[in-house]
Image (tube, rainbow, N blue to C red):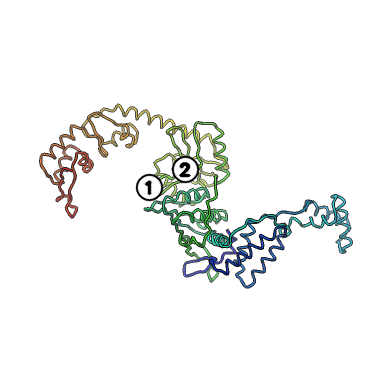
Amino acid sequence: MLPSELLVARIYGNKIVPRFARMSRENLGLAAEMINIFKTSIGRKRGEILDLVSEFEEGVNYRFVRGLRILLERRSVFEVKSRLNPVEVRRFVFEEASRAGGPVTSRGERRRILERVAVKLSSTVEEVEEALWADQETEQVLVSFSDVDPAELLRIYNLSLAQTMLFNAISLNVYVEGGGKEVLREVKYRGLMYLAEKQGEWVTITIDGPASLLKMTERYGTSMAKILPSVITSGKWAIRANVVRKGADNKPRIYEFTLSYRDNYLLKTREREEVKFDSMVEEDFYRAFQSLGTDWVIKRESEPLLAGKTILVPDFTLEKGPVKVYLEIVGFWTDEYVKRKLEKLGKVEENVILAVDEELACSSFQRYRDVIYYRKKIPLKPLIEILRRYEVEALERSARSLELERYVPDKDVIRLDEVADAYGVSVESVKERLHVEGYRVIGSLLISEQVLEAIKGELESKPERSRLEAEAILKRYGVGDFDLVLDALGFKTVWPGVIDPKKAKVVRK
């Protein structure tokens, strides 16, 4: 990314568009010449190199040249070239100068001071002179440079401009075709406030920007900008952001910034940086939990969880046998974000524990069942207590499931949710475990074969019945899920051109 003061953009109405570097012959030529200066300047001082580069600013947009220079400097390694420690040398020189009793006004006096320092350091005057300011940035020497293709440099520049746009964003919407798994991981890794939704083949990720926080933070804006490389490597994608910039009247205004996969030819496409932990809090927790030596297996990344139409990606997964628990660490937040987060968690069927920083905690979190508060480090004791409770609950469910296998029905038609409530298990567990001789599970019902045969006999007594007649027969036996039961018995509904139950017929398949 580039410093925000180097952002060059045009404004069209309510839209803002960065002045991306086109792949023109002029731009490619300029990039090639600047790259060549760095390639051929091994051993030169930084100040000398910058003087050479600054010549390109004449007659060219200086922000563009300066932006390319900054990117090339980031590909360079500069070192202090001095046998002596510059800080130590300066201290000795200033001490000797102070003993002179006044300002040093002649070259001869200056030379005598340097000679005395050289004797103390077992060095030469020339070495002392060279070391005096060798650690200053302009005096550092280029020792290596990572070469880059001119077109690639322009793409890196364009990506940096796009990222800089997001420093002062109020919100960012990311649209990714497919699962968007890598982008979601990056969003989680950066600790951003987000809401992810599945919309057909696309995943929409809405991210609150730094300008939406009570106090804008440079770190948050930088974190949001850093997800862009993972977005542009996602096949089909698009972003839309509302960013705060000063208008022609020098007053802050909100502008819309958009990009899509159609702009890929202008942008640097690179592999996502390998990341492990969002913060020291996460890394410390991971190491500490592993050192406990429990039977729980901890995993850094978690699969996305469905929360209605939205998606939640917890920070950690904890597994022990068939028991799986997720841990979500709450980072940046606003009141609205907390509200959305809790609503989302309320729709997740899996077990999720929240870890909330005490400094960020608010009363809203108290509504959630499993919350751990921490200061700098996540405490392990309350977490282990919650995990043990999940273990006990899992064992109890397993015991109830075994009891379920011995279930004896007391009537011919039974709703599965009633059985689930009686045994304290889910309807899915009932469907999986319930196998009663002489009964069949159809839809949400457990129906005796005797009743099914009776219904089948009545339906077959006429070669063709109206849909309404067939429904009346099933209702008389207390059976719902009409279509599923009819299908199980070998019947189907034939509808006329217009879906009208009065005209529909039930016939054998």
Q: Residue 415: x percent and y percent?
A: 26, 36
Q: Residue 15: x percent and y percent?
A: 47, 66
Residue 302's tag is 2
Residue 128's tag is none
Above or below residue 462? Residue 410 is above
Q: On the rendered image, what quadrant is the N terminus found in?
A: bottom right
Q: Callout 2: 10 Å neighbours few (<14), some, many (20+)?
A: some
N-term mark: 2 or 1: 2
Quadrant of residue 7 within the rendered picture:
bottom right
Tell me the kind of residue under disc 1. Gly
Judged from the image, the secondary structure of the residue bearing numbered disc 2 is loop
Counting every numbered tag in the picture gives 2
The reply to whether discs 2 and 1 touch (Cβ–Cβ < 8 Å) is: no
Residue 308's tag is 1
The nearer-to-camera label among 2 and 1 is 2
Quadrant of residue 141 within the rendered picture:
bottom right
Judged from the image, the secondary structure of the residue bearing numbered disc 1 is loop
Q: Residue 132: x percent and y percent?
A: 79, 56
- Residue at the extreme left of the image, as rendered: 462
